[in-house]
Image (tube, helix red, strand yellow):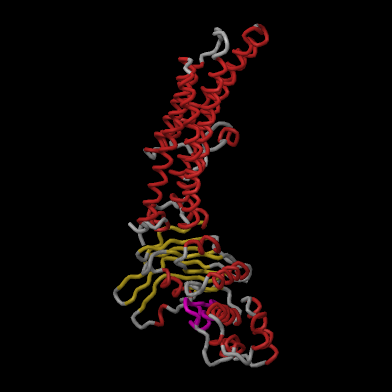
Amino acid sequence: MTRIRFQQSLDDLKEQLLVMAGLAEQAIQRAIEAYRVRDLSICDLVSRSEIAINRLEREIDQTALDLLAMEQPMAIDLRFILSVIKINADLERVGDAAKSISERVRGMDQMAVADLPVDIPRMASLAAAMVRKCLQSFIEADAEMARSVLSMDDAVDAMNRAAYKALTKVMEEQSHIAPQALNALMICRNLERVADHATNIAEDVIFWLQGADVRHYKSVTGGRDPHAVG
Amino acid sequence: MGVGIEVTNLNAWYGTNHTLQDINLNIPANHATALIGPSGCGKSTFVRCLNRMHETNPIARVTGTVRIGDLDIYQDAKPVEIRRRVGMVFQRPNPFPTMSIYDNVAAGLKLNGYSNRRVLDETVERSLKNSALWDEVKDELKKKSGASLSGGQQQRLCIARALAVDPEVLLMDEPASALDPVSTSKIEDLIFQLKTQYTIVIVTHNMQQAARVAEKTGFFLNGRMVEFDSTHKIFTNPSDKRTEDYITGRFG
């Protein structure tokens, strides 16, 4: 093994990203929990963690930039660093989505509880599972696990579409609970974005490990994954 | 214009040391092809087989076929004729130290029997222009010796000397490894221009240089060619684990 220092730097970069991943995953889980139990103190924790996430995002980008400039990485090392840069941006946006959800929870505190035709906890649990799984695929360097995340996104998208339809109907027909419906709609939208970021992260894990670009494969190939195994 | 090179079942030995084993390769015309690999992997031996320099060593031996364009170089031609068609530039610039710049460039032509002054003048000027050295030396062509130039200029002088005999292929064995970054950039720019007219094969230890100048790259290891593919593929997602381990610095 040569370039020992470089390999150590790559390990350090991965370690930094895992800390970032831990913070982002915790933030989205806390935001979901804050919604479930309507606890504003949890919203405060989400807001505080966003500061740490933003700081870490900049540090990771700086480390990655230094490695690109100083080490001129090739092949799997180059793909790893590019993936880290992109995953880093997606994790920061997961943190943003968590903060948006927690702000909606704060807004709901002033409103009467309304019975809405949408299962936010179920959608949240699916989006959180996607985040957990894509990060696990990164930790374990498992492209097949990353691929399994891609197919989960369709279910979240479908739930978001259904929520949009149901909640706009509520806003049209029951104007006295329109603010609650709008809040729920925004939370669904944020959860759908979290799922999209998890999908992006899974695609980046596949790119890192296999050099395969599987982004937008549905629009390019009409639904067939050109790099699917078997 | 450059011509393609077709290598079939090429094997080479130094004494009992089997330094190249079963090399099969098609090098495209008018492109730059880089050969990479750790020291002693056989890449320099390989390029020396492309102009029959390998066999100048009395204990060396070659089997297999090398076709340069339509010419089977081990069957159809003498080594001197091959070396006119296949120019070579070495790691360390090696101008003839006592000759002027002009005579350095004209040396190959004179050896081939050309003596017409006008032809020599035109060829020297064209070759120095093609090697991007003309503007720097045109006023002192016959006053200055080749050895008085800087290292980077000497290397471009050697390229001009190789171009003067109008080769079809230019072999470059680590042409910029002894040069500073600015001179290296000039050589790389030059390779970019020259490949429109010549087929270029460049041996390099500098991975970034291979990535910058070559369309195709071959990876040699222990006398065998492990992988030959587009440079883009080799440096972003090589097919063979050994190639990846080498270019990412895990060995070598």
Where is residue A78? Give x, y as percent.
Answer: 47, 51
Quadrant holding the N terminus of chain A: bottom left
Where is residue A18? Give x, y as percent.
Answer: 41, 38
Q: Quadrant of residue B12?
A: bottom left
Queried whether the magenta region covers residue A45, the answer comes back as no
Quadrant holding the C terminus of chain A: top left
Queried whether the magenta region covers residue B90, the answer comes back as yes
Where is residue A63? Give x, y as percent.
Answer: 46, 49
Q: Tell me what residue is drawn at x 67 percent, y 83 percent.
A: B125
Where is residue B248? Give x, y as percent.
Answer: 41, 55
Residue B131 relative to residue B35: left or right: right
Camera-side residue of A71 and A103: A103
Q: Against A199, is B189 above or below?
A: below
Residue A135 relative to residue A167: left or right: left
Q: How many marks?
A: 0
First to last magenta residue range? B75-93
Camera-side residue of B71 and A57: A57
Q: Can the viewer see residue B112 in this picture?
A: no
Q: Against B191, is A76 above or below?
A: above
Q: Quadrant of residue A169?
A: top right
Q: Against A107, is A170 above or below?
A: above
Camera-side residue of B117 and A181: A181
Question: Outermost residue, left direction?
Answer: B16
Q: Can the viewer see residue A154 in this picture?
A: yes
Q: Against B84, is A3 above or below?
A: above
Q: Tell me what residue is drawn at x 62 percent, y 9 percent.
A: A177
